[in-house]
Image (cartoon, grey):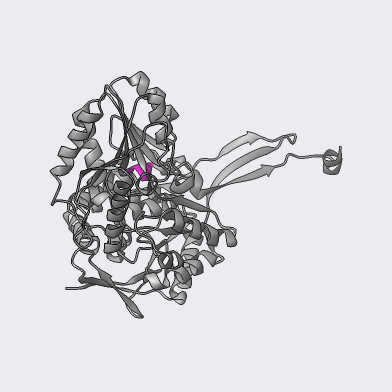
Amino acid sequence: MVHFTPLFIGEEQKFSGPTYDVINPASGLVVGQSVNATAEDCKAAVDAAATAFETWQHSTVAERRAIFLKAAELVETDKYKNMILQASQEETATLDAWPALVWGVASNTLRQVADLSGGLKGRILPSITPGGKLEILRKPIGVILSIAPWNAPLGLTLRGVMIPIVCGNTVVIKSSERSPRSQAIVFELFREAGLPSGVLNVVSCSSEDAAARTEELISHTALRKITVCITPWHISRKDLMLFDQFTGSEEIGRIIAKVAANYLKPCILELGGKAPVIVLDDAAVTAAAESIAISALLNAGQICMSAERVIVQAGVAPVLINAVRAVCQSFVGKVGPLINEASAERIVQLVKDAVNSGAELLLGDLTRERATVQPHLVKLPFKGSETGKDIGIWEKESFGPVFVVVDTIDEAIQLANTSNYSLTAAVWTNDLYVAKDVSERVRAGFINVNGATVHSELTVDGHGLGGASGYGRFDVNAFTDSRIVVTHGELENTTTLVFR
């Protein structure tokens, strides 16, 4: 049965109006339909959020925390687990492991964010005025627009709404046209947990209407800030003009930022990654190989933190490359499809171009079956003193890791930093002093020592350092304003004080 996803605006679930089909990328079959939001729907969603904000901003920290803790309990139930796994598999054709992993950490994530409410603290300081008092308050901003992608529909939609809501803001989610049902589960979860109507609203639209709907949401006078998580996959010029969320990353982020700038509204952009893994001569090869392969192949490589560039010292390179190849070989026939055939074709072409430029094909047959590409490994022909900027697979987000062999640690760091991406990285060595030195010199917002690039911590916000990985953070300071109130002491002659 084809599932139908309405819009969620204030107290209303809107089932009427134009619709669009949701297509499973593996089968090509229609697996769902969603209401296609109109300009009026977008305005209504922001209006509902603005109305709810008038009350929600005054809710107590305890009230917000209780809702998050209830949501954490609910998401652990079989009811929500089954809903999440089924929706993700039907809409994005992902294999069980990825949505199960995202579901598995959701409850702890909600609990951790509930505790962040304790960070909503102000300060009281003495004023420079005699007898005066200075108060620095942290207040919610208002209505937030969260644009969330399809590749981790539960996790990234939660990421886009949790901290804004716990800080006292209200949110409008613009879900991906690829996964409206999966992302609507977040609304259902919070509604069942007791979140008041209008605090969270959900709109979805077809890719053809995405550009217009996005600008209408951003331009609304009540909207205060935009958060964007964009997934890095095949993009055409037509897609760029349409804001098609199922792909893009740097390009789409740039376009949305320009639209927001037209209305002088700030953005938080979490875009793509080209995560480097530095493997030094003394690394634990077996553990490193397994970590690299899994970080590269999880969710068919469609994760912004996927391992994509393996920079290995010459002494351990033959052993590591063979070990990674063996692990990846074991996944042949077990990798799920990419989100569409265009993405698959792009990946195959990147590998072909690399081989034509002199790269050694270590694994793979340079083919695809519909949207599925089996694991490919490539060893690039340049050394550490070169940059590889003329080889697309080194510079562009891709499927599967590429290898470069270096002689020295300095060369490894130089290559790791030869990228416009800065999201995450990993370093493998048994010398923790070297690990500390290398990790402090690699330019990435989140660095794992002897761990997977896809690992993140619930209690801290890993983030890009600008460029193609975006900018801004998902934390309390990002979703609250700092407001200063000065209470003046009694003065005999205020005018004399001011002009003295």
Q: Residue at x 54, y 54 (%)?
A: 266
On screen, residue 8 versus residue 100, left or right, reads: right
The secondary structure that most of the magenta stretch takes on is: helix
User: Toward which corner of the image does residue 448 lie, by quadrant?
Assistant: top left
Q: Which residues are magenta?
A: 111-115
Percent x, y of residue 162:
38, 51
Q: Quadrant of residue 170?
A: bottom left
- Residue 249 inside the magenta-drawn segment: no
Residue 259 percent location from the top left of the image: 54, 62
Q: Is residue 436 above or below residue 39?
A: above
Determine the image quadrant of residue 371.
bottom left
Can you give x and y, in whole percent of width and height, for residue 20 in the image? 32, 75
Q: Residue at x 75, y 34 (%)?
A: 130
Task: Decide if residue 70 is in sight here.
Answer: no
Q: Name the one closer to the observer, 413 or 451.
A: 413
Q: Quadrant of the C terminus?
A: top right
Tell whether 428 sits left or right of 462. left
**Where 37 sits versus 264, above or below?**
below
Residue 204 location, x and y as percent?
Answer: 37, 68
Identify whether 69 is placed above or below 245: above
In this view, the residue in front, 467 or 380, is: 380
Q: Looking at the image, which residue is at 60% across and 41% down?
A: 136
Quadrant where the image shows the N terminus = bottom left
Res 478 visible: yes
